[in-house]
Amino acid sequence: MIAFQRGSRLRALLTIGVSTAVLALAACGGGGSSPESAVSVGAEGTDDGSTLTLWTRAPLEKQAKLLVAAYNKSHKNQVALTVVPNDDYVAKVGAAAGSSGLPDLFAADIVYVPNWVKQGLFRDISSNVDQLSFKDQINQGHMKAGTMDGKKYVLPFVLDLSMLFWNKALFKEAGLDPEKAPATLEEYAADAKKIQALGKKDVYGTATGLNCGGCLVFTWFPSVWAAGDQVMNAEGNQANFTNDTSKKIFQTWRDLWTSGAVLPSSKDETGATWTAGFTEGKVGLMFYPATLLSSTTKFDAGVAGIPGPGGGSSTFVGGDGIGVSKDSKKAAQAWNFLNWMMSEDAQVEVLAKDNDVVSRTDLANNKYAAKDPRLVTINQVAGKGQTPVALNFQQAYNAANSPWLTLVRNQVFGDAGKLEPDNQQITTVLSSQ
């Protein structure tokens, strides 16, 4: 998932500093992409028994191990996987970028990808991606994040989506249709209040991470997109939270908080336990990571896209992208892995079989997902979602005490009249050089 799963504010602050170090080191290593760095090999690449190195961060360890094991079993090439603790990953990539020691392939949190592409850490794979017959079916949010000046640098590695989950048992108790998701943000709030009105001990209508910038972008941005608006301009250097849609979202959550329908610990939740209440069956409905579907074993959970004011649905397409590093001397072999990774064999027989989200819309309704309609829904909503692109995304949104977090907390708990200056402060960080 995205960067909200850091363990403490200190580590988050360190991440900002290390991110800056990555950029400096990458620049020392040459930065930028040159024509000779482009990967242009045969359609399937080369499978000649070479050993490839691949790095990923710990939150994706399960999926990475499954993919690597399946590839190694069916190919002459062999991939040596290194799993790096999440809090150490940016520093490790930064050090390797500065010393020309990046692995052949490495995955990156999709919100970091635009910056790392700009710094030249990935090689251009456009000509090979363009040969894929299903290229237009690959998740467009991830592809957009990994594209610069019309050139493609990454493919989706693992997707993580934000979805609306609801507890069907609590819905039924509250007199709501347990098979029907709220179609609008207004209905979402009304349903949360009805569940709160049950008066059940330690049970609340909804929950979120109101002291976790990453949690909030993951779950609140989709409501803006669902209503047809954008959170930033196309260049990712100007915030857009003063529009009517955003104001309605903030007003809805302020009202939910004031009414007592939000789990009280949400106010200080920094991300480590933000989903725990729902997982334990003590929250009626919330915006929740799709990858945690398997954790809802204590009750029957419904799943739908995240609604906006007045309707629509969307999702934040998070997770990691993956590409060939600037330092790889085995581009043809690395492409062989990437080409296989996007194939039906890998997407369906490895990821979908493990109940993970596929990265191709044409494979959404696969034989494994068909066994659970909720998985089909998740796969289909993935094609409607977005991945916001901004070079300074981490500093503006995910960092501890980010201007985005300040804005949300003012809108929910504090002085709502500070919206304009708070929005401007996000823009200042987004546009800084």
Image (cartoon, rainbow, N blue to C red):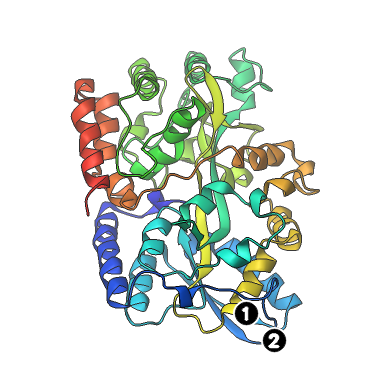
Q: In percent of the image, x 58 and y 32: which residue is there?
A: 305
**Residue 177, relative to residue 246: is it above or below?**
above
Q: Residue 384 in the image: x percent, y percent?
A: 59, 37
Query: Between marks 1 and 2, how big is the CA–CA gap?
Result: 8 Å
Query: Three-letter amino acid code at disc 1?
Result: Gln
Q: Residue 77 in the image: x percent, y percent?
A: 67, 82
**Residue 290, relative to residue 143: is it above or below?**
above
Query: Three-letter amino acid code at disc 2?
Result: Asp
Q: Earlier in the sequence, mark 1 or mark 2?
A: 2
Viewer-side residue, 287 vs 317: 317
The local secondary structure at tag 1 comes to helix
Q: Which mark is residue 129?
A: none
Viewer-side residue, 75 vs 240: 240
Q: Does the image show residue 356?
A: no
Q: In percent of the image, x 68 and y 75: which residue is there?
A: 42
Viewer-side residue, 178 vs 137: 137
Q: Give the residue number, with chain letter if any, for mark 1.
A: 333
Report the residue that reaches farthest toward the bottom: 49
Q: Residue 229 in the image: x percent, y percent?
A: 44, 28
Q: Does the image show residue 101?
A: yes
Q: Quadrant of the C terminus?
A: bottom left
Q: In percent of the image, x 45 and y 80: which residue is there?
A: 327
Report whether 419 appears left or right of 49.
left
Q: Give the residue number, with chain letter if any, for mark 2.
A: 48
